Image (tube, grey):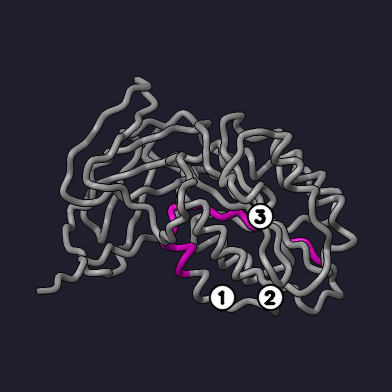
Amino acid sequence: MRQIAFVVFLFLSALVPVRQDRDGGQVTVAASIDLVVFNVTVTDSRGRHVSGLQQSDFRVLEDKARQDISLFRSDNVPASVGLIIDNSSSMLTKRADVVTAALAFVGASHREDEMFVLHFNETIRTGLPSETLFSSDPAEIRSALLQTDSNGLTALYDALAAGIERVSVGTRDRRALVVLSDGGDNASRHQLDDVLKLAQQSGATIYAIGIYDETDRDRNPGALKKIAASSGGRAYFPASLGDLDRVWRGVADGIRGLYTIGYYSSNHRRDGAFRRVDITAGHHGGKGLRVTTRSGYRAPVAKSTTS
């Protein structure tokens, strides 16, 4: 069984297998620095996903310095995906609709996606068997979604931190989390700022689905928006439970339509500093194309040596 190492950003080691869609082969790239990976969503002026872009259509700037793209994965490739489901008492009357829509999401996802399910109230429980980190079996994911009741308080931030930790050891280049909650938190050890930093540094794109009643005093849609935005993801707020199926399918389409872009930074310093990254798409002159991703990453820190 693999041990789960806590990783807050996605860096690959000096000898990295780089998989390109164009020829399906595997290339090993030797480097003395780390590969930085971003999931990227491209939409047109009407908000529709843009597919079919090539590596040459993208430009990457790190702190305004042009970077050479070393890893490029186009849309509709398998992903490592975590489903983080609020099972606090506020979800009691919504649970059946949530599970039904989540199952539709599984059905609309790539058949080779590897997934896990985390349920949370004031505690966090994995839906899969303890020895199973991820599964690509729809029946196993269905069982994981169905196995808990709604009660207790809400530890949203702790659940997100646990989800970021687990998805970091996924075997796919593309990684995503889908969290469904009212956005409230009354039981976490982590604070919102902690989760925002983890989300920004993680290689996973976070999609948030906010469902709540107007009388729900703990609802916090603003927190869900901030969490999603910090990772380059999106927050959805369906008007009714009947809209959940459409929203979950939209999230599945969003994950399948991501581009995965990686590069070896020309800045070799391991100083732990935040580096701003701007990615643009220039297909057909780039007019009206919007690129959504996280705003940057934090550089690794050099290991200290002892005499």
Q: Are marks 3 and 1 in contact (CB under 8 Å)?
A: no
| Residue 198 x %, y % | 46, 66
Classify mark 3: helix, strand or loop.
strand
Residue extending farthest to the top is 23
- Residue type for callout 2: Asp
Q: Which mark is residue 185?
A: 2
Earlier sequence position, callout 3 versus callout 1? 3
Q: Does residue 201 belong to the magenta stretch?
A: yes
**For the residues bearing labels 2 and 1, Cβ distance under 8 angstroms:** yes
Judging depth in this view, the residue of 239 and 180 nearest the camera is 180
Which secondary structure lies at badge 2?
A: loop
Q: Residues within 10 Å of mark 3 (few under 14, many from 20)?
A: some
Quick one: label 2 or label 1, which is nearer the N terminus?
Answer: 2
Q: Is residue 288 left or right of residue 238?
A: left
Report if residue 209 is visible in the image.
no
Identify whether 118 is placed above or below 157: above
| Residue on which disc 3 sits | 126
Say if residue 5 shows up in the picture.
yes
Q: Residue furthest left?
A: 307
Number of the front mark, 3 or 2: 3
| Residue lying at 18% horizontally and 39% vertically, measured from the top left | 30
Choose top left, top right, bottom left or bottom right for residue 89.
Answer: bottom right
Residue 182 picture quarter: bottom right
Callout 3, which amino acid?
A: Thr
The residue under label 1 is 192
Quarter holding residue 150:
bottom right
Question: Residue 198 vs residue 90: left or right?
Answer: left
Q: Secondary structure at mark 1?
A: helix
